[in-house]
Image (tube, rainbow, N blue to C red):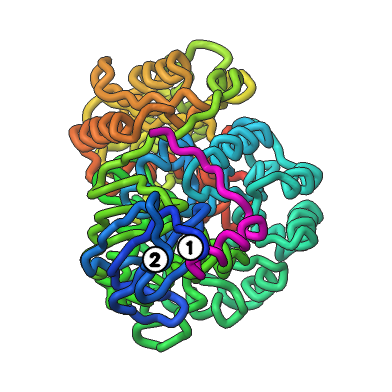
Amino acid sequence: MIVQSQIQPRHEVIGSLVAVATGRRPADLVIRNCRLVNVHSREILSAQDIAIANGRFAYCGPDASHCIGELTIIVEAGGLMALPGLCDGHMHIESGMLTPARFAEAVMPHGTTTMFVDPHEIANVLGLKGVEAMNAEAVMQPINIFMQVPSCVPSAPGLETPGAEITPMDVAEAMQWENIVGLGEMMNFPGVIGGDEKMLAEMAITMAAGKVVGGHYASPDLGMPFHAYAAGGAADDHEGTRERDAVARVRQGMRAMLRLGSAWYDVERQVTAITERGLDPRNFILCTDDCNAQTLVEDGHMDRVVRHAISCGCDPLVAVQMATINTATHFGMEREIGSIAPGRRADVLLVDNLEELSILQVFARGRLVAREGKLLATLPRADWPRESRQSVNTGRELTDDDFSICAPPGGGNGAALARVIGIIENQAPTKELLVELPVSGSLVNASATEDVCQAALVERHRGAGRVVNGFVQGFGYNGDMAMASTVAHDCHHMIVVGTCRQNMALAANRLAEVQGGASLWREGEEAALVELPIAGLMSDRKAKHVAAASRKLSEAMAQCGCHLNNAFMQHSLLALAVIPELRITDLGLVDVRKFELVDLFCNG
């Protein structure tokens, strides 16, 4: 069956809901004899029935026999627990390498029925048109995919060449669209603190529209800068990694979003603010931020996050609140989603155990859409604009000379002191390292003994043919290899990492040929390819196919010596010029602590 998203506004159906609740009209669906997880009162109510009409809950209480008619569908729960559909408070669909419809297909069997999405990845490639295309497919789905307007496009003005720009006027326009709930994560925290007119205008426009400003304070400094950022109006933040980060945000009236993504493991170190310090849990929200297709298919989505929070010592009912009603309340939607209560959208899960959260049935807006991990619905998909499939333009065919790094003037003695990006496993920040690298024939080379290989940024939005070279430590690569990716947060040019210049050129040219994705080459042969033809970021194939290709890529990276957890994410973040310390863009190396370009080589 093809499931559409049609659901009437609550004010249009109150008469029908009242009629069902009083027995004057039969319900469309009744779930009988469940243990209802009530997230409002934080308790489990036994022997409860749930009556649904018009895609919404009409009656929630003991014995709904009076709501049953000849055509009412009856589901015997047999004592299973019924809890609200799970909500992801902050995430990027593009990180799944899937379109909104394909992402929804992947997460619905895992119990996710609501997502709050910041599409700033595609915005950096296609601008507001990209956001519009994402939103168009989102509103077609049978689950709730709410959109935020990206705030920082480009993310690092003056330090990179963007594929597009979003202005305050664009933000004002998009705030009027259907399904827009706020402003995406305000990554330019130095701009907010320094009174940047553009950043403050975007936040003011969002507040004037009565919508939520998303936060992103990626700094450990909880002194004056943090207080200034909070004064700017960011309502939440997902960048905390320590208990004191979560505490500080909540004390300033923000919601602390604790994330567990494919590469981010920030729940365990922050949830102690609830489990040990006893802070009010209603101001904490669970989210994923970034989950790739392989994680979605093999490990799950928000169900994985809830299970993880419980394993970290969180009370199961509190964990469920943090993934349902807390999120809904934060976005001003607690009378629409996030709980099993009259009038809300009928998103409900049947499970047999809260701790293990094995989801047996998923209902979205009153329709059964998944059973025991299997999707039962065919979801509608939009036609993506032609320009979205023609986004990789390197301007010319690249050669190994493009990846040659000339020694600095006067850099004798067969060595050169270089700034090297240092990878930190399972974290977004990097380190600035100073490493002495060998010089041969006037070229500076990588060093296997120092675990240093080359990292290059290839401009791919405007066909400028520009290549910027640098070095990175921490991937563990060996042999002649290279990997290229058009997923390169947030500018999404092309990142190429390798030990061999010839393989770097082969990988880069391959992505130009297929219009985006990730390609790994070893000894002159392609070992793995993930094709992402939509904006160089997403595929419209099913998640299982993208996950299989991603798995092959991970295996190929491991065969080349890389054993980092979620190494592809670490690769794709090398250009993220809003998180310290050192990054690479199409304009050069960026010291993110100072927000300025720096030389590859150090004098003296």
Taking the spot 60% from the left edge, 55% from the top edge, the residue there is: 185
Q: Tag 2: residue type?
A: Ile
Q: Is residue 404 above or below residue 513?
A: below
Marks counted in the figure total: 2
Res 266 visible: yes
Taking the spot 59% from the left edge, 64% from the top edge, the residue there is: 333
Taking the spot 67% from the left edge, 50% from the top edge, the residue there is: 151
- Determine the secondary structure under disc 2: strand
Which of these two is toward me, 459 or 431? 459
Q: Quadrant of residue 473?
A: top left
The span picked out in magenta is 1-23
Which of these two is toward me, 192 or 304? 304
Counting from the top left corner in percent of width and height, residue 520 is at: 31, 26
- Residue receiving disc 2: 50
Taking the spot 56% from the left edge, 25% from the top edge, the residue there is: 384
Gap in angstroms between the C-alphas marked 1 and 2: 7 Å
- Residue receiving disc 1: 57
Which of these two is toward me, 310 or 407? 310
Counting from the top left corner in percent of width and height, residue 155 is at: 63, 46
Q: Is residue 583 magenta?
A: no
Q: Quadrant of residue 318?
A: bottom left
Q: Tag 1: residue type?
A: Phe
Q: Is residue 15 magenta?
A: yes
For the N terminus, the quadrant is top left
Counting from the top left corner in percent of width and height, residue 574 is at: 46, 42
Local crowd size for mark 1, using a 10 Å CA cut-off: few (<14), some (14–19), many (≥20): many
